[in-house]
Image (cartoon, rainbow, N blue to C red):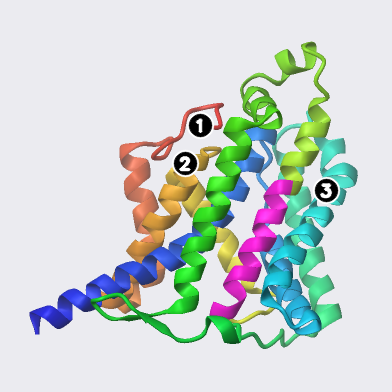
């Protein structure tokens, strides 16, 4: 009996990692945009939802989940670039409330657009045939796709880290998040960098939607709940902190998963309890540093 209990807990922990991988990807995109632009992007959940819809659509159209995984983030990122250029950019310097309200309204525009195109009932989604089945982890069998989800998140996070830490654009992004005025004095077009960052952030949200689609119902409202959860993860990790977004995403996923095992009725509440406990101890979040994208 004890062995069964330990195995079940171990499986729930791995399940939590898979759930946390989606949270982490979403929070990374959200933190990237906030850390550089100081824009609280309330449309982030909507971009996730658009990514899920387009992911299913492109998978059906091309017959390939891999192609969908490549195409969808590019399309969602392109939409994000257009939104930044023509909607968000004119509001820079007017205070944090203006972009917040705009992105809040943009989220409903995207929701209604998906309803008009794909219908109010959403789209059926399923695990790609090549990724179905389970893998024996030694303490139990675990769905192959969820392991792929964890691995894909690790690859994306590592690639983003390499981009920010090892490239010229990454250096400018880090410098611009600390002191954009100095970067301007050095002759760098900061608005172009902000444009790129917003596009990358929304592309990551779209990628999260593609990866999450086989594990949940794809409908126009799916981004609303995800937005609340991703904001909790971002706050727990520290606003603007990319390492914090990853750690907090995985932590929240495991907390929700274990709570679902021992107290299912409290699973949805557990994420907010965790946030409250973290903020009581560290008001800036686990990795948060005021004004910096750590």
Q: Considering the whole magenta stretch, tell me its main secondary structure.
A: helix
SS at mark 1 in the image: loop
Give me the disc on residue 163. none
Question: What x and y, as percent, mark residue 255?
Answer: 33, 62
Q: Circle 3 is placed at which residue position?
A: 81
N-terminal label among 2 and 3? 3
Q: Which of the two labelled residues, at mark 1 and mark 2, occupies the earlier sequence position?
A: 2
- Name the residue beneath numbered marker 2: 243
Q: Which residue is drawn at the image coordinates 31% and 73% (left, top)?
A: 12
Tag count in the figure? 3
Relative to 75, say whether 145 is above or below: below
Q: Quadrant of the N terminus?
A: bottom left
Q: Position of residue 212 (x, y in %)?
A: 58, 71
Residue at horizontal 73 percent and vertical 17 percent from the top: 183
One can see residue 223 in this view: no
Q: Evaluate if marks 1 and 2 touch, with contact meaning CB atoms under 8 Å apart.
A: yes
| Circle nearer the N terminus (1, 3) | 3
**How far is mark 2 from mark 3, CA to CA?**
24 Å
Mark 2: which secondary structure? Answer: helix
To which quarter of the image does residue 137 belong?
A: bottom left
Give the residues in magenta. 200-215
Quarter-wise, where is residue 192 in the image?
top right
- Tell whether position 178 is magenta: no
- Residue labelled with disc 1: 294
Q: Nearer the viewer, residue 61 or 20?
A: 61
Report how far apart the C-alphas of labels 1 and 2 lie in the structure: 7 Å
The single residue placed furthest to the left in the displayed view is 2
- Asked if 276 appears above or below 164 in the picture, the reply is below
Question: Which residue is at 30% across, 38% downward?
Answer: 281
Task: Give the image quarter of residue 39.
Answer: top right
């Amino acid at each position: 009996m004890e062995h069964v209990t330990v195995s079940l807990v171990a499986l729930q922990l791995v399940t939590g990692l898979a759930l946390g991988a989606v949270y982490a990807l979403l929070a990374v995109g959200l933190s990237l945009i906030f850390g550089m632009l100081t824009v609280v992007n309330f449309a982030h959940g909507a971009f996730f939802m658009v990514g899920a819809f387009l992911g299913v659509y492109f998978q059906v159209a091309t017959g390939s989940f891999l192609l969908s995984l490549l195409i969808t983030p590019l399309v969602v990122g392109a939409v994000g670039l257009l939104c930044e250029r023509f909607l968000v950019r004119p509001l820079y310097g007017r205070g944090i409330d203006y972009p917040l309200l705009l992105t809040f309204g943009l989220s409903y525009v995207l929701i209604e657009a998906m309803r008009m195109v794909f219908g109010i009932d959403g789209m059926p989604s399923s695990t790609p045939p090549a990724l179905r089945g389970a893998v024996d982890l030694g303490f139990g069998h675990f769905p192959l796709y969820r392991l792929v989800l964890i691995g894909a998140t690790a690859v994306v996070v590592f690639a983003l880290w390499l981009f920010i830490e090892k490239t010229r654009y990454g250096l400018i992004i880090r410098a611009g998040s600390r002191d954009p005025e100095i970067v301007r004095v050095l002759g760098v077009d900061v608005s172009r960098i902000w444009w790129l960052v917003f596009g990358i952030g929304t592309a990551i949200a779209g990628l999260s939607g593609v990866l999450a689609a086989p594990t949940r119902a794809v409908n126009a409202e799916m981004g609303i709940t995800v937005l609340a959860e991703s904001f909790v993860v971002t706050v727990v990790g520290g606003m603007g902190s990319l390492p914090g977004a990853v750690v907090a995403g995985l932590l929240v996923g495991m907390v929700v998963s274990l709570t679902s095992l021992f107290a299912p009725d409290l699973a949805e509440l557990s994420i907010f309890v965790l946030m409250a406990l973290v903020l009581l101890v560290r008001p800036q979040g686990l990795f948060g540093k005021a004004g910096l994208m750590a």
